[in-house]
Amino acid sequence: EPALLPRMWAAVRALAGTRSLLLLTIAIVIASLSGAGADEAFPVSLLTKGLDARALAPLSVLEDLFGIAAPLVSLALVRRIGTERLLARSLLAAGAAVTVLFAFRSVAVVVVLLVVLGFIDRMWDPAALARLQDDIPSAHRAAVNSLVYQANGIAEMAGLGLLGVLLGSRSSQLREAPPDLFQAFSGHAQTMTHVPASWFGLPVPDLAIVVLVLLGVLAVPFVALAARARRHRPPPPRVALAATGPGPPASRHGRPGPASADRRPARRGAARRA
């Protein structure tokens, strides 16, 4: 379509020209990269610790049940502390929670961590997307949303690639460990319990979780800069409303303007003369 390229170019200019929008988009992309890799690393970590593969299905259901309440909690926190504080504190809370793996590495700890981080992620998403829509100019909303969606897709692929790098030489074997439901319940799933340790004595999948979640903390400065740019954004110009009556508009106290006051005695005098 001939008009497609001009619209996309206008969307790029709107994205680059609105500082708060650009910074928030960068924060969302970083969070998407972090979340995509961590989501894939958790099942690998659980299976390598000896968890039955059939337990992944109810665990996913449990995570979804907690996720139902997450948008409601997000809305309540936005009203209480503001959107930017919620976004920044959510990322910082996730980064602080994942450090528990340095001290405790049992299956129960990873399960609790999976549910907690999933809840935080589901609080982050609606708040970030709502703030993004507030910053997008209405004339370019569809095109800018498409650009952000494509950037998120690229970031998620990069997160999976980073996960492969962190898993190292056994990446393909570890990433194929989580089975589908048919394989899990038919008994064809294999559990890997011998996984080499990496930095700080962490198993390779646990190290990948820590690195990927802490990577999401890098989005916090961009959230703060976006909030600052939004506060210093100049207000939109006021549009003067045209008067709807034949005479000048009334003053702010509701009294008629000078011209209407002048016309009123003239009408009375004309009535008396008649």
Image (spheres, rainbow, N blue to C red):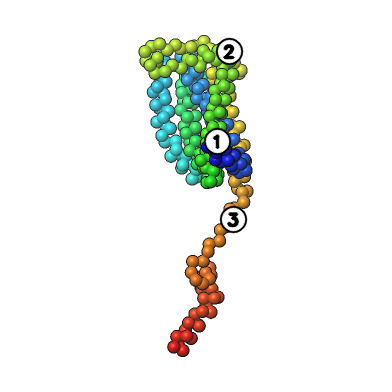
Real-space Cα separation, disc 1 to disc 3, in angstroms: 28 Å
The residue shown at (42%, 36%) is 69
Vertical comparison of 56 with 126: above or below: above
Task: Indicate the amino acid at tag 3.
Answer: Pro
Specify few, some or many for label 3: CA neighbours under 10 Å numbering under 14, 14-19, or 20 or more.
few
Residue hosting label 1: 147
Task: Indicate the amino acid at tag 2.
Answer: Ser
Residue 237: mark in rendering:
3
Residue 153 in picture, x, y percent from top left: 53, 29
**Helix, strand or loop at mark 2:** helix
Foreground mark, 2 or 1?
Answer: 1
Specify few, some or many for label 1: CA neighbours under 10 Å numbering under 14, 14-19, or 20 or more.
some
Visible residue check, residue 88: no
The residue shown at (39%, 18%) is 181
Residue 59 in picture, x, y percent from top left: 41, 24
Real-space Cα separation, disc 2 to disc 1, in angstroms: 34 Å
Q: Give the farthest residue toward the front.
A: 2
